[in-house]
Image (tube, rainbow, N blue to C red):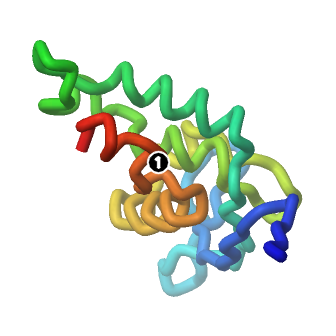
Amino acid sequence: MTTFRLYGEVFKFEAEKPLVHPVTKEYLKDDEGNIKTEIVNYEIREISAAVRDAFLNENAKRMRYNREGKVIGVREHKGMYSGLLAICLYDENGKLIPEKEIQSWPTTTQEALFIEANKINKLNKEAPGEAELGND
């Protein structure tokens, strides 16, 4: 018998986040001029099938296709990583992280989290039946 967890896969991690002044939006610094930070807990959660399908449909619009319908490149790169993270990355209060905030993070951070989000949500797997249909 196979057992499934209905709440799906979760990848938990903590990150060091800079503290920002609420009014000036400048980084808060200590007496030596170092940026003050806090540790924040995040989770990448598995998305539902409906959310996955909507994400894949939206992502398909980014691609360039040849006459045979095969992907030959990417038309629009903006938000490729942050778009996925914005539907599965949660803060310690259970709220989704806004895409605008994710876009402000370093590319190395986004890429590492994007890889984990892809693994958890099985987005790099070949769709069932594609190999038989010749869409490899």
Residue plotted at (40% across, 50% down): 126
Residue plotted at (48% across, 78% down): 33
Position of 1 relative to 84 (above/below):
below
Quadrant location of residue 7? bottom right
Q: Nearer the viewer, residue 64 or 43?
A: 64
Q: Position of residue 134 (x, y in %)?
A: 24, 37
The image quadrant where one finds the C terminus is top left
Position of 109 relative to 14 (above/below):
above
**Three-letter code, disc 1:** Ser
User: For the view shown, which residue lies furthest in the top direction?
Assistant: 67
The image quadrant where one finds the N terminus is bottom right
Q: Position of residue 76 (x, y in %)?
A: 28, 26
User: For the view shown, which residue lies furthest in the bottom direction?
Assistant: 32
Q: Position of residue 49 (x, y in %)?
A: 69, 40
Q: Position of residue 80 (x, y in %)?
A: 39, 39
Q: Nearer the viewer, residue 65 or 127?
A: 127
Report the residue marked by disc 1: 104
Q: How many numbered markers are drawn?
A: 1
